[in-house]
Amino acid sequence: AGQSICERCPRGTSSGAGSSSCDECAADTYAANEGQGECIPCPYPLASGTGSVTCSVCKAGFYLKASADPADVFKSPTDYCKPCPSDAACPVGTTLETLVLPRGFWRASFSSAELTECRAFGGDGQAGQARCVGNVDPGEASGRRVQEAGLDYCADAFAGPECQLCREPNHYLDADGAACNECVAVGTAAGRMAGTALGLCVAFGLVALAYSVQRGQTEWRKERFIGLPLRIADRTGDAIYKIGLIPKFKILFGFYQVCLVLSTTYSARLPERYTGWTEALAEAVFIDWSGIVLPVQCLPHKSRLVAVAISPIGVIALLLFAGIVLRLCARWRRARRGAGCESGSEVDGATSNVLGGEAQLQEPPSSSAAEPPTALAETDDAAVFSWPAEVALGLLDLTP
């Protein structure tokens, strides 16, 4: 129109009736053939740029699941364009590799559409955002497109799942979950652990010694503050001895160990009513003590496995040592008490010879002043077991 010779508009353009020029197709439209009178809208959910001859990218709110031939994408758009994951952003032309993640989120790889919100790990609600920077802010190096910048959605100092690992070796995530601290030396951590264990043993030993010394005394048990705990300890010890709680506990503990290894060792499974409480108890009492002494990132995985594996042996050795010490202390006290009784009898005999008949006129001591029957029984027991026998019995006292 208006020209002596009409020419076809090229692909990607159109010319309406009476138009003297070809106009590029607007965004989200296309012209696949020459000489089209109008551009055709892209099929849902595809999009295109200006002057397009086909629609081969996904519109905003969708991402291209996998790279494919544009013709295949155009023929089956819903097979290739998928809705944007929640918490992610998908501008026009987004692919699975270029999903836009906001701060505080992380994903395992460029081929994963599952987003994980970074946890605080002991810190406040901002700790996860401090570690996981996403790829939203184009002006920051840490916020550039991850595929272009070679990052993994983490701030410069962090790496790994949810950005909870430290990039620098010999560093660990602090208690606030937002910074990396340098690990202490392994020798220093071992010394702290040994000092803590020794301090606890000494403290418990002093408490046990004080209780045993005051076992037959009544003065402390009349005190306002310490008397009640001592009386409760007396009654608890008597009840444990009378009902035989220690042997019963050993039997129960042995059954508990059998239940734990039955399925893995013998491929057998007990009914749920037997194993439910044991599994719940195992989850509750299992504590990675090595992580308390030294953070996970500060100790190699192999060394941690070795430490956790041999820790039960150390506990058993400690119980054996404690049982022997308690037995020998009790044996030593009984021996001293018996020697004291013998020396007291000799002094009484000498006094009777000096005083003559006056000693015979003295009244015998009342039953309330006499030594308790338990002490006499302990004195008799001291003559039954020798020191080596006490050591052997001490090995069995506290071990399950």
Image (cartoon, rainbow, N blue to C red):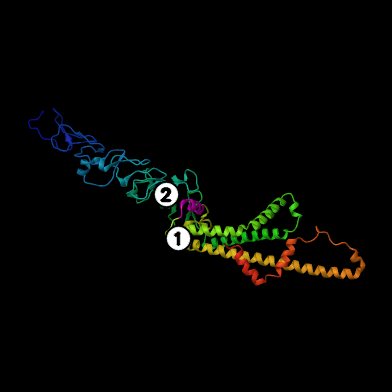
**Residue that carries the numbered disc 2 in the rendered image:** 162
On the image, the x and y values in percent for residue 122 come to 50, 48
Q: How many numbered marks, from 0 up?
A: 2
**Picture layout, residue 69 above or below residue 168:** above
Would you say 203 lies left or right of 99 here? Answer: right
| Amino acid type of the residue that numbered disc 1 sits on in the rendered structure | His
| Magenta-highlighted residues | 270-283
In the image, what residue type sits under mark 2? Glu
Q: Quadrant of residue 39?
A: top left
Q: Is residue 351 left or right of residue 33?
A: right
- Answer few, some or many: residues within 10 Å of disc 2's Cα (few below 14, many 20 plus, some between 14 and 19): many
Residue 301 image label: 1
Whether residue 102 can be seen here: yes
Discs 1/2, front? 1
Residue that appears at 64% across and 61% down: 202
Say whether residue 204 is magenta.
no
